[in-house]
Image (cartoon, rainbow, N blue to C red):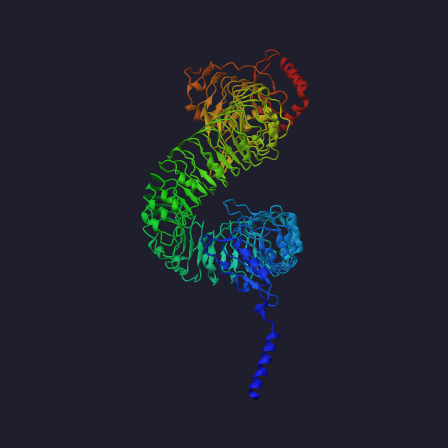
């Protein structure tokens, strides 16, 4: 009995104890919050196919179960409130709306929605309801729009990650943050420790706001945020900062001289601008483990204070302008695991063996002359996994490579390695090598197979390899063999490379058809077969490559109707088909035709005809570049999508008027409508619809009327070519708004105006062509001190201009006065999007320069009514390639100074009234290939030697008193009469400094006196500058006085 009483008492006590204990399961998961989560779940779809890393947590959420047990949900133990929600990588697809049930979870302290797709939803100001929030991660989730200032209300935030958000529909449009919002956010979030803003458009943010960053910050990253200005030095003094990453921005960095943060462990400022040298004070970062200063325009040598960074494991100073020797103290940083000093201007020969003391070294990248110590470097780098020696002037494969047992990545690109690959090289990294780059060498011979089973990336580009195309290992991901001599067909075995993502075989001698089986490469994203000899058609099976991003089959012999199915491929962003034999019409798209991701489309230089189906342009909402040029398209002008930046439909049969709808494409940079059959007048909006427009080419149409008068202020117009149309009237003065204008070609129109001397104020104008119009009147003196000083091509030919030769302009053509002696690759006018062209009269022929060399200079004032004499200072234009003053009324002598024009290739002074002899100095111009002095009044023997021996008689015809080869008239020994001229005659009245002191016959006009005064001295030399200035100041009266006194002295 007593035993049972004891059990009863024990039971009662235990029951009482259980009643007193908090029964947690009964208090967890409030119904309101439970229902809010289910509603939130129902508002999104889950797409596991789009991301292999997906972890669809919400599929475990079931009604009737405790929501605190659901994946991604954390509850507070006592109250049962949901305080944490982690839905990262949950494959969510949909729009986050302001009435979302998510905002009912008011007690949230942590919210992680990273790595989902919210379809360009804005970051909502309703997030401010989470007053207790400590952690907010919205990264990689396709949010767009502006970061709301209401984020600043979350005053307890410790972590804020808004990084890597942009539109996910083919247009890269980042999340943005305004200056005011950023300023308030950093002022209010004083407890913030981690802030990640990577890939947010912060171009409107003033860097001065960084002064207010929380002193609690341990991590701050703003990678590629379009930040501009000067970075405040105080950011390097934040007391708790461990990791600072601000790379890929356009700001200037000035390091502080002292007071560096002692806590900083990682500093990444690559692709920014650091003024000058690496400061010695960088040695104060005693705890620094990672230093990335790649491509920062650094100069000078590596400071010795770097040796103080004894904890450094990663050092990247690559792609700067560092000089001197690579310092030996670098190898004293014994913790170094990654060293990249490549692509600088280091000098001397580096003993690679010095790095052997770095026992932890895993990656080494150098660009410097090397002493490789072939016989003593075995087993030196026992842990080395990455070795990059680009541009080290290597002439052979370094034998020590065979000792690198752990090698995973090898880069020997941009060297001078020649001959065939040695047999021993195939054993390098045989069981480990994953990446091999031997591009841009002189390696020749064939490759049968690759022995590296782990290889995923190989680049053989820009060598002399030949023979059949080698097949890489099965697991290859990136294979590049551009710019070689591989021949034959693409083997079908390449279609078995199921992991292949990028196949680049451009510029070889490959032939045959494109294999049908390429459609089996499901992961292929880049296919470049351009500049080969492929024939046949593009196989329809390529449509099966669902991941294909880029297709380039340009410059081949593909003979096919247009593959319309390409334009409907969902993932293609770049289609390049130019220079093939595509023919026929392009059919309209199949219905339904979904919005495409296409951004770049070129089908120029084919045989396509008919009208371009406008339906494509209505659906290509992401298009950036479209090139339909050099076909036979007809009909009205197709209007590209508003997003288009480069549009060319040149050299077709497009007719009708230029529609005002073209002005809706406000993003245009290049608009080329040249060589069509466009007519009518231009819409008034055409010159002002886009401030970003750089090139406007309407050449060779039938457009008439006046040029629209309204040019946008602060526009970026660089090239304006309206030549060979029927434009009338005067040149609009609003062209002065075009301060970036470099090329202005209005040749072959019907414009009637006086010479627009005001164009001389345009600071960048390099090409001015007004030929074959009805410009008339005198060319007045320039008003500006620096007028046309950048001009390289000056063409006023075939107009009705009169008066004295415009010497005052010629003497200001500064760009033609200096010879560019630099050697190297030719540079052309234009940019990567468009290269300028111009029609010039060269060597007696009209020739279109399809590209304009930056060193090309010419003056053509032919077929006008200019009078006066050639100035002595014409010899100062030392870079001049062509000079044409033909068919004018020029008089006087050909100046001896023309012999200074050592770059001159053609000279045409025909059909004028020049007198005297041909200067012997012209015979010394070794570049002179064309000369026309016909129809003048020249006398005496034709100079002999060099180029003059190659000219035919028509170069000198109709000068009755010339003699000698190549004319039939021989020269006699009798001295010819030398025509008398005046003393100290000014060439161009009103333009001081252009004088010649010529040979004279004593007493002309004042009586007869025997004797000849010798000398032909140009007053341009320094010893006569004082005299030139004196003459300019004295004016016409003083000159008359000198002439009168001279006559009197000779009469005596």
* Number of numbered markers: 0
Q: Is residue 2 above or below residue 134?
A: below
Farthest bottom residue in view: 1
Which quadrant of the figure contains the N terminus? bottom right
- Regarding residue 516, the answer to whether it shows in the image is yes
* Observer-nearest of 233 and 642: 642
Residue 766 horizontal side relative to residue 153, left or right: left
Residue 799 screen position, x and y as percent: 54, 20
Q: Is residue 212 above or below residue 29?
A: above
* Observer-nearest of 607 and 638: 638
Determine the image quadrant of residue 424. bottom left
Residue 1010 screen position, x and y as percent: 57, 14
Residue 450 horizontal side relative to residue 906, left or right: left
Determine the image quadrant of residue 36. bottom right
Residue 47 screen position, x and y as percent: 47, 53
Q: Is residue 884 above or below residue 359?
A: above
Which quadrant of the figure contains the C terminus? top right
Residue 122 horizontal side relative to residue 398, left or right: right
């Amino acid at each position: 009995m007593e035993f049972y009483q004891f059990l009863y008492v024990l039971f009662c006590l235990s029951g009482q104890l259980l009643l007193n204990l908090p029964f947690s399961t009964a208090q967890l998961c409030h119904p309101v919050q439970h229902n809010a989560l289910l509603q939130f779940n129902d508002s999104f779809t889950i797409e596991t196919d789009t991301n292999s890393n997906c972890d669809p947590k919400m599929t475990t959420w079931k009604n009737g179960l405790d929501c605190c047990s659901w994946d991604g949900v954390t509850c507070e133990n006592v109250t049962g409130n949901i305080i944490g929600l982690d839905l990262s990588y949950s494959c969510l697809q949909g729009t986050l709306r302001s009435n979302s049930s998510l905002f009912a979870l008011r007690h949230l302290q942590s919210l992680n929605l990273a790595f989902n797709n919210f379809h360009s939803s804005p970051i909502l100001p309703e997030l401010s309801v989470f007053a207790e929030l400590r952690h907010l991660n919205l990264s990689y989730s396709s949010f767009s729009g502006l970061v709301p200032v209401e984020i600043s209300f979350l005053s307890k935030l410790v972590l804020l990650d808004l990084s890597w958000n942009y539109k996910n529909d083919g247009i890269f449009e980042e999340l943005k943050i305004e200056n005011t919002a950023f300023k308030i956010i950093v002022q209010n979030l004083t407890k913030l420790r981690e802030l990640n803003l990577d890939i947010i458009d912060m171009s409107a943010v003033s860097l001065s706001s960084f002064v207010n960053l929380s002193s609690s910050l341990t991590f701050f990253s703003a990678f590629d945020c379009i930040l501009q200005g000067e970075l405040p030095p105080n950011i390097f003094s934040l007391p708790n900062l461990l990791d600072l990453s601000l790379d890929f921005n356009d700001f200037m960095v000035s390091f502080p001289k002292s007071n560096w943060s002692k806590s900083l462990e990682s500093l990444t400022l690559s692709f920014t601008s650091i003024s000058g040298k690496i400061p010695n004070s960088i040695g104060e970062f005693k705890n620094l483990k990672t230093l990335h200063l790649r491509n920062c325009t650094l100069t000078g040598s590596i400071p010795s204070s770097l040796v103080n960074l004894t904890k450094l494991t990663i050092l990247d100073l690559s792609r700067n302008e560092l000089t001197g020797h690579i310092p030996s103290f670098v190898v004293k940083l014994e913790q170094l695991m990654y060293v990249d000093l490549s692509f600088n201007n280091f000098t001397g020969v580096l003993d690679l063996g010095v790095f052997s003391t770095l026992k932890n070294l895993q990656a080494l990248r150098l660009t410097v002359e090397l002493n490789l110590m072939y016989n003593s470097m075995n087993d030196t780098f026992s842990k080395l996994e990455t070795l990059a020696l680009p541009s080290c002037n290597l002439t052979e494969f370094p034998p020590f490579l065979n000792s690198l047992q752990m090698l995973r990545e090898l880069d020997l690109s941009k060297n001078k390695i020649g001959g065939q690959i040695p047999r021993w090289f195939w054993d390098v990294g045989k069981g480990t090598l994953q990446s091999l780059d031997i591009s841009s060498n002189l390696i020749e011979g064939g490759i049968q197979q690759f022995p590296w089973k782990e290889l995923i990336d190989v680049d053989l580009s820009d060598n002399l390899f030949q023979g059949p195309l080698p097949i890489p290992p099965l697991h290859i991901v990136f294979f590049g063999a551009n710019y070689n001599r591989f021949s034959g067909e693409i083997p079908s075995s390449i279609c078995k490379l199921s992991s292949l993502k990028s196949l680049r075989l451009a510029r070889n001698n490959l032939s045959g058809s494109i294999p049908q089986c390429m459609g089996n490469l499901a992961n292929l994203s880049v296919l470049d077969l351009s500049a080969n000899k492929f024939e046949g058609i593009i196989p329809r099976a390529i449509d099966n490559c669902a991941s294909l991003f880029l297709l380039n089959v340009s410059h081949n012999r593909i003979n096919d109707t247009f593959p319309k199915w390409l334009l409907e491929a969902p993932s293609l962003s770049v289609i390049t088909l130019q220079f093939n034999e595509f023919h026929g019409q392009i059919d309209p798209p199949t219905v339904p035709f979904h919005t495409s991701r296409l951004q770049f489309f070129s089908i120029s230089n084919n045989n396509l005809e008919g009208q371009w189906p406008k339906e494509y342009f209505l659906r290509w909402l992401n298009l950036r570049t479209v090139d339909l040029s050099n076909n036979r398209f007809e009909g009205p002008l197709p209007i590209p999508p508003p997003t288009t930046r480069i549009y060319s439909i040149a050299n077709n049969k497009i007719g009708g008027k230029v529609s005002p709808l073209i002005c809706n494409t406000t993003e245009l940079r290049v608009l080329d409508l040249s060589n069509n059959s466009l007519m009518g007048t231009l819409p008034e909006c055409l010159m002002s619809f886009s401030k970003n427009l750089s090139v406007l080419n309407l050449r060779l149409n039938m457009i008439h009327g006046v040029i629209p008068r309204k040019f946008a202020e602060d526009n970026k117009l660089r090239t304006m070519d309206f030549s060979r149309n029927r434009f009338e009237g005067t040149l609009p003065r609003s062209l002065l708004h075009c301060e970036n204008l470099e090329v202005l070609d209005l040749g072959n129109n019907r414009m009637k105006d006086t010479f627009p001397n005001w164009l001389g104020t345009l600071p960048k104008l390099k090409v001015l062509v007004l030929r074959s119009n009805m410009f008339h009147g005198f060319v007045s003196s320039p008003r500006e001190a620096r007028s046309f000083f950048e001009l390289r091509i000056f063409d006023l030919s075939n107009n009705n201009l009169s008066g004295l030769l415009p010497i005052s302009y010629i003497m200001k053509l500064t760009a033609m006065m200096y010879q560019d002696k630099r050697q190297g690759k030719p540079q052309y006018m234009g940019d990567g999007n468009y290269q300028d062209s111009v029609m010039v009269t060269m060597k007696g022929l009209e020739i279109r320069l399809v590209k304009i060399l930056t060193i090309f200079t010419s003056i053509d004032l032919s077929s006008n009514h200019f009078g006066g004499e050639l100035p002595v200072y014409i010899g100062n234009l030392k870079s001049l390639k062509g000079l044409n003053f033909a068919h004018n009324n020029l008089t006087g002598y050909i100046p001896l100074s023309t012999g200074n024009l050592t770059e001159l290739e053609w000279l045409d002074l025909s059909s004028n009234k020049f007198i005297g002899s041909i200067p012997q100095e012209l015979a010394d111009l070794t570049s002179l290939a064309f000369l026309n002095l016909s129809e003048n009044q020249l006398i005496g023997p034709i100079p002999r030697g060099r180029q003059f021996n190659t000219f035919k008689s028509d170069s000198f015809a109709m000068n009755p008193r010339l003699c000698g080869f190549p004319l039939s008239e021989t020269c006699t020994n009798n001295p010819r009469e030398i025509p008398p001229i005046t003393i100290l005659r000014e060439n161009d009245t009103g333009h001081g400094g252009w004088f010649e002191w010529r040979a004279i016959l004593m007493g002309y006009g004042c009586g007869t006196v025997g004797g000849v005064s010798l000398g032909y001295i140009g007053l341009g030399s320094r010893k006569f500058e004082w005299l030139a200035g004196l003459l300019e100041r004295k004016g016409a009266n003083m000159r008359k006085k000198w002439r009168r006194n001279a006559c009197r002295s000779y009469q005596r």
